[in-house]
Every structure is written in structure tokens, then in C-alpha cells.
Image: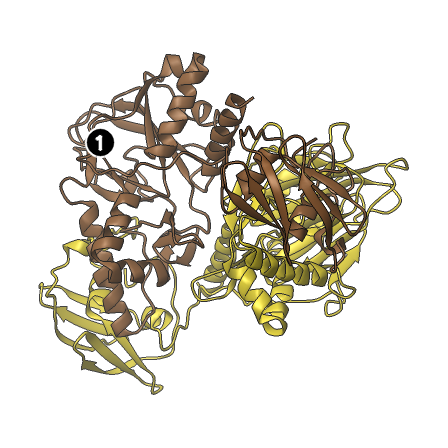
Chain colours: A brown, B yellow
Amino acid sequence: MDTPDFDHYPTARRVVGVTLEALGLTAHWDDGARTAHHTLWLRENATDRATTHPETREQALQLVDIPADLQILSAHASEAGGLVVRFSDGLEARYHPGWLRAYARETQEAPFALPPRRLWSGESLPDLPRFPAAAFAEDEAVFEAWGEALHILGFAILEGVTPKPGQVERIAQRLGPLRESNFGRIFDVRTATEQTSNAYTAMALPVHADLCTREHMPGLQFLHCLENTTVGGATRLTDGFQLAETLREEDPRAFETLSTEPLLFANKAEDSDYRWEAPLIGLDAKGALQELRFSPWLRGPLSTDLETTDRIYRALRALFRRAEAPGAFLRFTLKAGDLLAFDNARLLHGREAFDGNVGSRWLQGCYGAREELHSLLRMQSRRRRL
Amino acid sequence: MDTPDFDHYPTARRVVGVTLEALGLTAHWDDGARTAHHTLWLRENATDRATTHPETREQALQLVDIPADLQILSAHASEAGGLVVRFSDGLEARYHPGWLRAYARETQEAPFALPPRRLWSGESLPDLPRFPAAAFAEDEAVFEAWGEALHILGFAILEGVTPKPGQVERIAQRLGPLRESNFGRIFDVRTATEQTSNAYTAMALPVHADLCTREHMPGLQFLHCLENTTVGGATRLTDGFQLAETLREEDPRAFETLSTEPLLFANKAEDSDYRWEAPLIGLDAKGALQELRFSPWLRGPLSTDLETTDRIYRALRALFRRAEAPGAFLRFTLKAGDLLAFDNARLLHGREAFDGNVGSRWLQGCYGAREELHSLLRMQSRRRRL
């Protein structure tokens, strides 16, 4: 066990020298890089069995049990090009050079990093990411390419999935567990007698994200087309992250408003009352886009003063207008057997109105979690490094 | 349809006068209150069928389709004590007084508000919230009291749940769909041959939250004790929100660090690689506690400079120490038939070490979502207002 986890850290770089610092040490590398490592950081990531459980690789030594006055007594480059560190509590620990380069702030050569997302507009993406269902089922490489497209572009289409009920669950589960909701494990989108949601009418649905009214909106959505013989009903897809980044650049005040002012998202139902308050644009702690609660028609009333309300409405209208502008969205018609998978916290989906009296339209859908896709992509990359 | 949703808004208050404003209007009430309402806010919450779909109660008129120069032409108190407003696009709309009071910033008499949480320490909560399983199954009022305790205190214990596999799923589903994970729909906590998690050993587990390595950590956890004849293995529960509020007061720098600096949470497994970066203390947009990624032993390495690393470690140690301090936690032993439900994003749970060679210990668990509990509590309150 030369790293505190199960990943592989290939590197051509070697530590050639060490300088001790008040808070830890600086490693000097053969390519001129310098990386700083805190005493506690080195200590708690040691790989001896008392610090890291040999089978689970989880921390066995608790952070609070490390002496507050712990010091590094000495440190030098190891034969493997990593580090050997002797601590004042008696431990001598060895660190893998690739692991050090992966996590050091100065290098961050992280083999587990996901490929960067590619943002798009309706005009910048000429070809849809389409994959044949048969190859997806049999060929691991096609499955991997499908998963990468789903992450990088935010969506991917399988063609030729048997247009029978239940297939969507089978496909979605290849990534991981489904995310169930009160609409069921699988839901059917067709004009129903009981219209409990705008989705179940023949109305046009402006582009939107699903389940914005929940604490956790689902990260992935899968829609399998079983029948489509209606007139109209084309699908629209907008890259919400592209939209938000454009807003950030062109209308920073609107972006600021929508990423800081909490809005109320509320379902309207007789038998449930889901509501959640959050900014429409969810950013992570570093300011990167994380999720969009892009909900034109499941917003609850604002409870803000007149000026704030005015500012929020201006910002909402600026964003919503961009989402339906020509060139913002892709437009295509799902045919029986198509299965559209997409990032529900990034992409916006909608449909044009259709004639509810001609032919039939039946989609079956379910939800999943982005964390499962991310884990899968990392595992694929880890296996390639073996 | 006198409100734009399915809720009920009883009120004894009446509008007695209206003043038009540049951005909307101010309503004057018979108790002296004044509430301000924006023109667009009134317009988009009108209850006519072109604005609010009569069956789904979802917005049928899109915000972007309202004229930018819309004006209020006139407004007055209605006979019912609410408002009548005439807009420049020709619509005359009526608003229910209770609905106005529920959402106005100045009154916020929201019948759908959840009861406030009651934070506790191990010393301030003498009696555990225990409920008999038989009454829970038969008596709606007991089910409601159990749900309220689960929200207000963050946990509740059912006693006498048949100690057989699968019961935990049956109980959890009374609230809503399960949240599945790679550990399965239901997971078994007992010392197993294959130790893929510290939980599956006989080690002491410091108090912690589960699945902090995911984008969405589960909001609810259910643990059903099927067997417990070991020596040791007592359960500990800490109110993490109480802990965090104390830290906010007594060590504001540590609180600031832990609520702003993203940490890496990473599982350590051979067949999956879940990781998520977020501050340990998650706040909502108003600064209130939302979730704690309280993960002493599934933290990945920090990638910060020496000074920031030092500040983070100091803050982590301050928080972790408090969690295990005498008086911080409740301590009790689960017996066969006990089913502990708790808020996994608020409470911390742990267990003391036990003797893996004496007797047996078997818990069955599953996860759920807080949003289901919240919806249920609101629906119970709505029915009481009927």
C-alpha cells in the first residue's frame, strides 16, 4: 500500500530535495516544480495500518487524535521519487510521487479529474450525439463514449431501444440506482385524463428543468420514446450552463441577482406540497455553475420588497427570454425507440405543442444521479491507467 | 378558484384600502398592517384560467409573455376582504386575503411553514422520542407525531418493529420513495468478511453523517436493529446543527472557514470513485444551516496552500472535538425491534466499539429524502385547516 486509496498515480516526476517549513515542508521536483505539504496533511494521509485501514482505506486514525504539537523531524526524497517523512510521534511514512503531484495545490495532476464540460448553443452543435442501442449493450467502448457525451455535452441519444415499457429503467440502471420521486420509479408522459402536471397536457412546455421544487433536484433524466405519431411536439434542448455563462458576461447584475436571491419553487398539487427556496442559479463554493432550478411555471410567489421583486423579475425575464431565443436551443423530433439521457441540473428541455387529437405520443422517463455518472467516468479512467 | 394553488388560507384580516405605487400597490389592512405587492407579482399570480391552469394550478401564462410596460389601472378592496386589481392588459383579478397575508413580506402568515427545529445537546434532551410500532401502524395521529419529532428534534425511535429483514423499507416508504445508493436499496450493517467500509468492522465509529461523498447526501436515514447481543456497540447521536450554531457563536473564524472553504469528500473503494467538493457546513442563501458533510474519515486530501490548510485543520479539529465531548451526544443501546429514523444532514450518528467475537449485531438500513417528510408535514397541516 503506497497510496492511501485504491487509485493509480503514474508519474515520470521525482522529488529531488526537501526544505522543512514552519507548517510542513516543500518538496523540490526534477522538473523544477515546488509543492508545499502541511505536517498534519502528511501525517493523516500516511499509509500505515494504524492511520489508514488496510482493507477499507478509510481513515482509521482520527484527526483529533493526532497531537496538536506534532512536528516533522526529518524528510528526504525516497528511492521511488516520493517522500520519506519522520514525525515526532515516532511514525516514519512514505509517500508516492504521483499521489503527491495529484493533490498538491501547485501541480494538481489529478488523474481522477473529469473531462471538462463543453458548453454549446443550438447553432454551435451541428451533430447530435447519437449511439446505436445494440452497440451500447454489447460494446463497453460505446457505453463509455455515451457516458462521456452525457457528461461533456450534457446529453446523449440512444437509437433503436425496443419501444416497450420498462426499457428506460434497464438502460438507466446501467449507470446506477434510479432516483425515485412521487411520480413513481418510472413515469409516463402522455396526455392523461387526470392532468396533474402541465407535462401531461398537449400544451407547449417552455424549456425547463424537472423537480426544481425538491431539496435535491435529480441530476440525470432519461426519456424513452415509445410512440410518437402526433403532429407537432418537437423536443427542444437548451444548454442552461451556456445560457448562464452568457448572462454572467452580458448582464452581470441579472446573474448576481439570480445566483444570490433565494426564490421559492413550489409544486401545485392536491396531495403533496413540495417547496424549496434557493437561488435559481446554484454555484459551488468556487463560483462555478452547479445546478439551475430553471422553473418557469413552478415558481411560488416571491416574498421580497418591491425593489427586490422588481430586480428579480427583470433578471428572470432576461434569462427566460434567452432560453427560447432562436439559436439558443436544439430542436429535433424523438421517434419511437429513441432514448434521450440528459443532465437535468444543466440542460433545459421543452416540447412544442402538439395536436392531442391526432395519433399518440408516449414517453417513459426516470431519473438518476450525476454522482453515479461521475464515479463511472473516474473508474473507466482508473482502469485505463492500470 | 380564489387562490393560485390548492392550499387553504384562513384569515380574519381584511383589506380596507389601497394605495397605488410606482412598482405596484400597497394594501392597508384592518389590523393596521401594510403589505406591498409588485404589479408583475399580482399579474402572474392571477387565478384566471389563461394565467393559472385550472387543473394543474401551474403557471399557464409565461412570465416573458407579460407586457414589459404592464400597469395597474385601478385597485380596491374586495367584498371578501382581499383585492380587486385591473391591469392595463385588460385583466381584472381578485386575490384572497389569506393568500396575500401568507406571501407578503411584511406579514408572512404562512400556513405551510414547517414548525421550527428544536436544537438539543446530550444534556438538554432527557427523554428520547419513542413511539410504539403498533400505534404507528394503526393511528394516523401517532404517525404524525413521529414525523413531527423527526423534523423538530431530527430523530425518532419506533419500538417493537418486527425484527425481520425488509421491515425498514416498509416503514421508510410510508414517508415516500427510498433513496437508493451503491450500497443497495437496503443495506446491512454487521461485521462482514469483506470489509469495504469502516461501518462493516467492529471498530468504534466516531459520530458522522453518511454519504457525504455524494453530490446529494441523503436527508433521512433509517436503521432497524434486528439483533444485538454483543458487548459494547452503544449508539451515539449528536445534534450537528446545535454543534454548528455553538461553533458560530464561540469560534466564528472556524465557522467561517468550514462554511466557505470547499473540502474534498471521497470514498475509498476499488469499484467506485465518488467525490464531491463542498464546505463541511452547508448554508442556504440566507445563512441558515442546511446540511453538514460531517465526515471524519471519508475526507480526501486538501489541495490548499499551507496557511489555508492550517486554518482548515484548526477548524476541523475544533468541530470534531466538540462532537465527541461529554454532554454533546445522546448515548443509548438499540435493542432488537428498535427502528431509529434521523435527519442525516443534521444529526451525527456513531457507535462505540464492540466485541466482534461475542454475540451478534445486525442493523438494516435505508435512506430517504427530507423533502418527503416536509411535504407530509405540510399536507397534515393543510388538512387540519380544511
Figure disc tally = 1
Report helix, strand or loop for mark 1.
Answer: loop
Q: Is residue A162 above or below residue B65?
A: above
**Drawn side of residue B312 relative to residue A126, left or right:** right
For the residue carrying disc 1, how many other residues have a C-alpha within 10 Å: few (<14), some (14-19), or many (20+)? few
Q: Quadrant of the C terminus of chain B?
A: bottom left
Percent across and percent down for residue A235 are 23, 33
**Drawn side of residue A252 relative to residue B336, left or right:** left
Q: Quadrant of the N terminus of chain B?
A: bottom left
Q: Is residue B139 above or below residue A29?
A: below
Identify the residue at horizontal 47%, vertical 29% (top origin).
Answer: A377
On the question of residue B33 being in view, the answer is yes
Identify the residue at horizontal 37%, vertical 43% (top origin).
Answer: A345
Chain label for disc 1: A
Viewer-closest of B314 and B307? B307
Q: Amino acid at mark 1?
A: Leu
**Drawn side of residue B364 relative to residue B106, left or right:** right
Viewer-closest of B127 and B22? B22
Residue at label 1? A125
Percent across and percent down for residue B276 are 52, 44
Q: Is residue A296 above or below residue A130?
A: below
Viewer-closest of B219 and B340? B219
Identify the residue at horizontal 38%, vertical 74% (top origin).
Answer: B11
Viewer-closest of A66 and B42? A66
Percent across and percent down for residue A157 are 32, 25
Q: Is residue A314 above or below residue A288?
A: below
On the question of residue B175 being in view, the answer is no
In which quarter of the view is residue B253 placed? Answer: bottom right
Percent across and percent down for residue A374 are 47, 34
